[in-house]
Each structure stands twice: as C-alpha cells, then as structure tokens.
Image: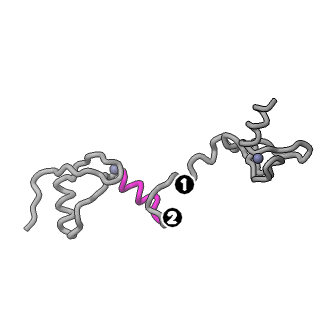
Amino acid sequence: MYSATTDKALTCVDCNQEFSFTVSEQQFYADRQFSEPRRCPACRAIRKASRGDSGNSNYAGGDYGTSRGYDRGPREMFSATCASCGREAQVPFRPSGAKPVYCSDCFSTQRRSY
Ligand SMILES: [Zn+2]
Ligand SMILES: [Zn+2]
C-alpha cells in the first residue's frame, strides 16, 4: 500500500520550475491511481483555462499582440518586374509605373555606373 510521508520535488515540463508534490496530493493521486503530475499548479491552471479554445496544446500566444500599434511591418515590400533584367524585384515602395523599377542586383549596378 502506498503511503507518502514526504513532499516530493517535481519539475514542471512546461516551465521547468520545481514544485512540490505534497504528501496530501500524493495520497490523492495514489488513491485515484493517477500518475504523478508533470506540471506545476500554475501551468496546470493555465492549461485548464486554455483547454477547449484550441486543439493545440502549445500555447503559441493566441490573441497576444493584437493591440500593439504595429500594423505596418518593419518594411512593406512590393513585387515588380525589373526594368533591366525582367526578373521579379522586391521594392520597398509601391511601383507607380511611371518610373522604372530595378531589382536589387540591377539597382546596385545602376548606382555604381553613375
Ligand atoms: Zn510550470
Ligand atoms: Zn534586374
């Protein structure tokens, strides 16, 4: 018969923090033939709270960051056709059609020849 006498230190698989699996918890788990918890109480609570709203157990941030004032990326790139070599070029501005657009290769060649 299983009888716990001391708290056990377990390591949480989620946050890697040690947490104590207390004697009463050990008894509780043993009575129900549960295996030892793999997560600390905090992580278990998080999992419980997030359970059901996504099938993915990896909490990847979800709605985090939607309120950040970052609706433009670092730099928005547009694709255009290079006027020199005809390849696709990525340019940091919207091509107007009035000016020729060069790919980065041709652009640097042009610059150099000036
Ligand atoms: Zn944890
Ligand atoms: Zn080019």
In magenta stretch: residue 50: yes
Q: Estimate the x, y position of residue 99 in percent, counting from the top left.
A: 89, 42
Q: Is residue 91 above or below residue 38?
A: above
53 or 70, which lies in front?
A: 70
Q: Amino acid at mark 1?
A: Gly
Instruction: Look at the image and tell me in which quarter the N terminus lies.
Output: bottom left
Q: Is residue 58 above or below residue 93?
A: below
What kind of element bears circle 2? loop
Q: Estimate the x, y position of residue 6 in percent, counting from the top left.
A: 12, 51
Main SS of the magenta part reads: helix
What kind of element bears circle 1? loop
Q: What crowding class fits label 2: few (fewer than 14 Cα within 10 Å), some (14-19), or many (20 or more)?
A: few
Residue under label 1: 62
* Magenta part of the chain: 43-52
Q: Estimate the x, y position of residue 57 in percent, counting from the top left.
A: 44, 61
Residue 48 figure quarter: bottom left
Q: Which mark is residue 54?
A: 2
Q: Is residue 90 above or below residue 113?
A: below
Residue 107 figure quarter: top right
Q: Amino acid at mark 2?
A: Ser
Q: Are marks 1 and 2 in contact (CB under 8 Å)?
A: yes
**Is residue 9 rendered to the left or right of residue 86?**
left
Q: What's the distance in space between the residues labelled 1 and 2, CA to CA?
A: 9 Å
**At x 31% / y 48%, what residue is drawn?**
16
**Is residue 2 rendered to the left or right of residue 45?**
left
